[in-house]
């Protein structure tokens, strides 16, 4: 009989992978379960959606990353439930697996605040599939506009609306504006891509609400300099394939992207506990579920309160720190040592890029903006990429894209966009 302590980690994102990587010991058996076969570097996902980077440069097979860990088994499976009484994890295909310790790091998806029917018209950005769908939608809009002879239809095709002015929304509109203003104009013959209308819609009073007000103001000015219409204090009231309604104004727009909110995975339902407003599982200071010291919940799935009483943000560094903490706590627990103390989140700064050569950075007492912040942003992201090859590949892609305006990732692949392709203009 295998007497090794079996730890099952669900989710191969930042938190889950950090936990698996730090959790080591001869008396351990580890199983990593994920519905996909890859780890995704989400901070650069918007660059796949906007054709700057190919998918292969921000995602890596989990089996490859853990190939030198014989005690780690990787399973590709969709989790549908947890039986805490029997310590069993259930899968969609009817299978199951027993655990001694369970770590749920299942992340989050986009939230439409009760309007889930808007998702088809305004997809969110959380997975590679989301990114390639958005890229296809965006590039196909330019292609359809090139063939359209109807001025109103062409204007709708060249209108791009991003909802939500957090870092993802800001980064998306910045790159879309760069594409329309600087990269694409020489490639089309019947349209001027510089006439594209790029809108950033935010229900709150300002962009990048989590940043200091001066950096928020700089970001708004930088986006407007790129040609982005920044609409703050205005909420989306309707959204369909043809238009987006902001307040009472219906604006024809064939490409809308949702970056306004997130909701946690169904982990709270699996555990039969009441989640918070975003569906996150409340956890204690040791990241365990009340009454179940063998179940940990981390990352975007968990509602965590820091030692200072403030909520821990749902960002990649927080998820990684939580994964590392759980690994350390389990190592102490299995060896019979005292617990390492409560989880303590250490904020290392916030970054957001605006187009190609501007960004903002908030490190508390130190605040940066402009080109210097952009270099800091780039170096930070390169540092956290996995493997030297990937770092070199991303640097080369950025250099090539920024100096030539060309990108091999600007391809329309993986299915049809769904936009009606208008009749081509007559050629004389």
Image (spheres, grey):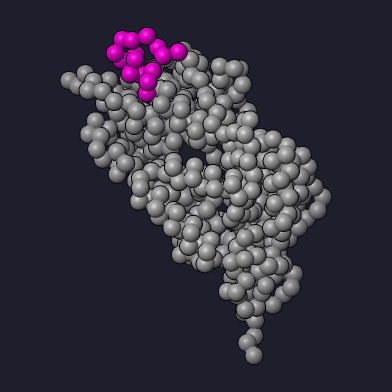
Quadrant location, the N terminus: top left
Q: Nearer the viewer, residue 316 or 159?
A: 316
Whether residue 420 is in magenta: the answer is no
Task: Locate residue 361 relative to residue 81 in the image: left or right.
Answer: right
Q: Nearer the viewer, residue 222 or 270?
A: 222
Quadrant location, the C terminus: bottom right
Task: Locate residue 65 relative to residue 260 in the image: left or right.
Answer: left
Residue 176, image quadrant: bottom right
Q: Which residues are magenta?
A: 327-341
Q: Is residue 1 above or below residue 161?
A: above
Give residue 36's position: percent from left, percent from top: 39, 44
Q: Nearer the viewer, residue 248 or 214?
A: 214
Task: Locate residue 409 relative to residue 235 in the image: left or right.
Answer: left
Identified at 46% across, 26% down, the residue is: 322
Q: Is residue 275 above or below residue 227?
A: above
Give residue 233's position: percent from left, percent from top: 78, 42
Q: Is residue 423 above or below residue 19?
A: below
Task: Locate residue 107 relative to residue 68 in the image: left or right.
Answer: right
- From where the camera sits, is residue 300 visible? no
Give residue 77's position: percent from left, percent from top: 36, 39
């Amino acid at each position: 009989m295998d007497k090794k302590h079996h730890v099952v980690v669900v989710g191969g994102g930042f938190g889950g992978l950090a936990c698996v990587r730090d959790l080591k010991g001869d008396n351990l058996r580890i199983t990593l379960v994920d519905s996909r076969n890859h780890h995704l570097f989400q901070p650069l996902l918007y660059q796949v959606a906007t054709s700057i980077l190919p998918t292969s440069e921000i995602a890596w097979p989990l089996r490859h990353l853990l190939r030198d860990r014989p005690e780690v088994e990787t399973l590709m499976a969709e989790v549908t439930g947890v039986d805490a009484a029997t310590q069993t994890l259930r899968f969609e295909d009817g299978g199951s697996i027993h655990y001694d310790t369970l770590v749920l790091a299942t992340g989050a998806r986009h939230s439409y605040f009760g309007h889930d029917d808007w998702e088809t018209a305004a997809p969110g950005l959380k997975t590679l599939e989301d990114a390639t769908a958005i890229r296809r939608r965006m590039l196909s809009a330019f292609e359809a506009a090139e063939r359209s002879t109807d001025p109103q239809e062409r204007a709708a095709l060249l209108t791009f609306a991003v909802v939500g002015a957090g870092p993802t929304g800001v980064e998306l509109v910045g790159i879309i504006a760069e594409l329309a203003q600087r990269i694409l104009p020489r490639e089309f013959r019947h349209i001027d891509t510089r006439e594209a209308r790029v809108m950033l819609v935010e229900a709150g009073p300002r962009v990048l609400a989590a940043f200091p007000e001066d950096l928020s103001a700089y970001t708004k000015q930088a986006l407007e300099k790129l040609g982005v219409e920044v609409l703050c204090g205005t909420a989306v009231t309707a959204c369909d394939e043809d238009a987006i309604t902001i307040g009472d104004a219906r604006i024809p727009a064939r490409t809308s992207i949702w970056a306004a909110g997130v909701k946690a995975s169904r982990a709270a339902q699996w555990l039969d506990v009441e989640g918070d407003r975003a569906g996150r599982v409340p956890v204690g200071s040791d990241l365990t579920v009340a009454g179940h010291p063998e179940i940990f919940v981390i990352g975007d799935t968990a509602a965590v309160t820091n030692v200072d009483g403030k909520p821990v943000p749902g960002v990649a560094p927080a998820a990684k720190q939580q994964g590392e903490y759980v690994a350390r706590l389990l190592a102490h627990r299995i060896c019979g040592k005292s617990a390492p103390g409560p989880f303590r989140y250490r904020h290392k700064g916030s970054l957001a890029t605006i187009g190609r050569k501007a960004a903002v950075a908030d490190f508390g007492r130190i605040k940066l903006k402009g080109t210097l912040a952009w270099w800091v942003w780039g170096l930070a992201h390169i540092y956290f990429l996995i493997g030297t090859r990937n770092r070199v590949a991303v640097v080369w892609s950025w250099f090539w894209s920024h100096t030539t305006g060309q990108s091999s990732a600007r391809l329309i692949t993986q299915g049809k966009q769904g936009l009606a392709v208008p009749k081509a203009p007559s050629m004389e």
